[in-house]
């Protein structure tokens, strides 16, 4: 309570805010003493209580001061200190008070003033910094550090002359020039992220502002269905070799997309989905993407299958394994690992058309045997992976035509041949196998074997070639992924203009059927590119143990473009 007293006594001496502060504190003390707010506010009561305590110590001072304080209570607080000072010029009384009062709080006064001044300065500086922070930002623009308004956008930087990129052009829907310089104002990346022309650029980022890109006019789009037709493909054995993909199709409608430019009025039609004819459809995929479908037959097989999976894994590559059903028992782990790596596990029949199929031609079997070969092949996979595989078959020896197409129509959706035969079954040496792998073009299906004999040459060739193809930008995909590209469209869209502009254009959605096959011919093996096996090897190419004499003249150009035949 003595400190409270001291503050109470000091109050009249201070004319500044410190005094007021002390007065406030005293009143707080009054509240805490249990008096009601009304009493404290009355002033008299508040003054009464401490006075009795003070008078015990210093009757003279207390009586001198108290009336003035009590009398000034109704006045404003700011006026009070000036009023109080007047009775105090009495130096003797002041000195007496100083002697009696503890000196420490008196000395604190200039310090508090200094602290207040410092606080004001700090607040001012802080406020300025905050203001500057809120209204500006620092950027590194095209290598130069600058401070700009906090709401600066690529457009304001261009308008303020910070950068001077060339704007892109506005293009019509058919790709012709509609308006020069009316495309994108500039192209902006901030710390590697694109920033819209009118988006605020994030502060403290490194900004690269380049020339604007061309933009295409707004357009209206309409789609209509293209009904599928009946397939007119060649179902003979020679027809088989005109493409690696053989669909047993019930037909699927395609889609035609029509776009009309809102400014130019130009209309462009494009087949965005080719219809799939109903019937036996033969084609090779011609995607614009650099993708290859590696396929391995006759596994699973000790050593070679896992060695191949190791290489696939190292190259982030997927492949498709056409398995022999009866070999799966005892090799379940290999099948599971194939699936785990994202590879596709499909059937190559249950026992490679053994028995009446003579180990190579399912067509030699009875209809019920053919169905059983396929169904048991599916089941062997399903037993391990827990789900039915896709109804996609690779027929042993590539022997799939006429009778089998009809017999297996309800059991097989697609039969997969190949575009590139590595002839690894004949053990031509890993270099020869590697050369064939490197001859592949986008969309090709490559035939190899992980089973049926010693496949160390195949393993060595893969080890050598996959990193090279990855280097060239190739991705290795499954058959399912290859089928998703669909049948290549030929130049299929051309439409009259619906406006007076008279300009007509056409585009195609996929690479057309003649350009795709030559895309990869820049590789160092292009001169030797080949897509088919040589004529005497086809019937036995699928297994080095089969010796069928049938169809010896079957192989020929796949019609895939690069057709010169090579044999190591
Ligand atoms: Zn085979």
Image: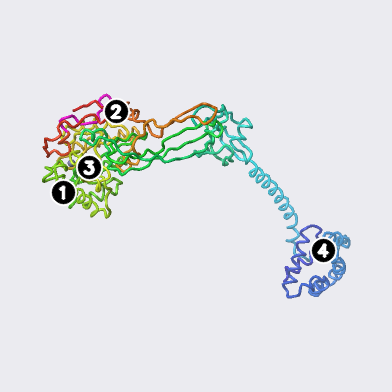
Residue under label 2, please give it: 561
| Residue 313, image x, y percentages | 29, 43
Q: Residue at x 79, y 57 (%)?
A: 16
Single out the mark in the foreground, 1 or 2: 1
Single out the mark in the foreground, 2 or 4: 2
Work out whether 180 lies above or below 477.
above
Q: Secondary structure at mark 3?
A: helix
Q: Which sits earlier in the primary sequence, circle 1 or circle 3?
A: 1
Indicate which disc residue 113 carries.
Answer: none
Residue under label 3, please give it: 405
Residue under label 4, please give it: 12
Q: Is residue 214 left or right of residue 304?
A: right
Q: Is residue 533 magenta?
A: yes
| Residue 540, image x, y percentages | 15, 36
The stretch in magenta equals 525-537
Q: Judge by depth and name the residue closer to the eye, 349 or 116.
A: 349
């Amino acid at each position: 309570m003595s400190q409270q007293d001291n503050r109470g006594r000091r109050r009249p001496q201070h004319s500044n805010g410190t005094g007021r502060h002390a007065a406030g504190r005293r009143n707080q003390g009054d509240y805490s003493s249990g008096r009601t707010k009304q009493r404290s506010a009355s002033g008299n009561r508040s003054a009464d209580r401490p006075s009795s305590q003070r008078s015990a110590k210093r009757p003279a001072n207390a009586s001198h001061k108290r009336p003035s304080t009590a009398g000034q209570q109704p006045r404003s607080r700011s006026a009070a200190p000036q009023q109080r000072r007047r009775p105090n010029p009495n130096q003797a009384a002041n000195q007496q008070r100083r002697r009696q009062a503890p000196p420490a709080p008196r000395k604190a006064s200039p310090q508090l003033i200094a602290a207040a001044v410092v606080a004001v300065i700090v607040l001012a500086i802080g406020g300025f910094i905050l203001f500057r922070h809120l209204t500006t930002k620092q950027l590194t623009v095209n290598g130069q550090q600058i401070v700009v308004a906090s709401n600066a956008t690529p457009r304001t930087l261009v308008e303020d002359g910070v950068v001077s990129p060339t704007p892109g052009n506005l293009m019509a829907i058919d790709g012709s020039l509609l308006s020069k310089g009316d495309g994108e104002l500039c192209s902006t990346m901030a710390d590697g992220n694109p920033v819209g022309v009118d988006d605020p650029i994030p502060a403290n980022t490194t900004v690269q502002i380049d020339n604007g890109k061309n933009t295409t006019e707004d357009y209206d789009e309409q789609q209509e269905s293209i009904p599928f037709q009946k397939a007119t493909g060649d179902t003979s054995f020679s027809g088989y070799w005109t493409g690696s993909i053989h669909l047993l199709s019930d037909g699927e409608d395609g889609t035609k997309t029509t776009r009309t430019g809102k400014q130019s009025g130009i209309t462009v039609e494009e087949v965005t989905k080719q219809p799939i004819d109903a019937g036996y459809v033969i084609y090779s995929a011609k995607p614009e993407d650099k993708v290859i479908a590696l396929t391995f037959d006759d596994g699973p097989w000790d050593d070679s299958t896992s060695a191949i999976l190791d290489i696939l894994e190292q190259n982030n590559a997927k492949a498709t394994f056409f398995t022999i059903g009866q070999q799966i028992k005892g090799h379940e782990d290999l099948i599971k690992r194939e699936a785990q790596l994202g590879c596709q596990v499909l059937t190559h029949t249950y026992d490679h058309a053994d028995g009446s199929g003579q180990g190579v031609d399912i067509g030699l079997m009875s209809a019920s045997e053919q169905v059983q070969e396929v169904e048991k092949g599916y089941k062997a996979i399903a037993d391990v992976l827990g789900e039915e595989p896709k109804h996609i078959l690779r027929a042993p020896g590539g022997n799939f035509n006429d009778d089998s197409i009809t017999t297996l129509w309800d059991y097989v959706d697609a039969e997969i041949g190949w575009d590139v035969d590595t002839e690894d079954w004949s053990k031509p040496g890993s270099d020869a196998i590697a050369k064939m792998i490197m001859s592949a073009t986008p969309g090709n299906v490559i035939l190899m074997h992980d089973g049926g004999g010693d496949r160390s040459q195949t393993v060595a060739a893969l080890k050598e070639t996959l990193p090279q193809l990855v280097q060239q930008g190739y991705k290795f995909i499954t058959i399912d992924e290859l089928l998703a590209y669909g049948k290549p469209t030929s130049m299929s869209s051309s439409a009259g203009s619906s406006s007076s502009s008279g300009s007509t254009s056409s585009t195609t959605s996929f690479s057309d059927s003649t350009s795709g096959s030559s895309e990869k011919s820049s590789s160092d093996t292009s001169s030797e590119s080949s897509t088919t096996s040589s004529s005497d090897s086809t019937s036995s190419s699928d297994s080095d143990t089969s010796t069928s004499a049938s169809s010896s003249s079957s192989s020929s150009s796949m019609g895939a473009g690069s057709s010169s035949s090579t044999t190591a």
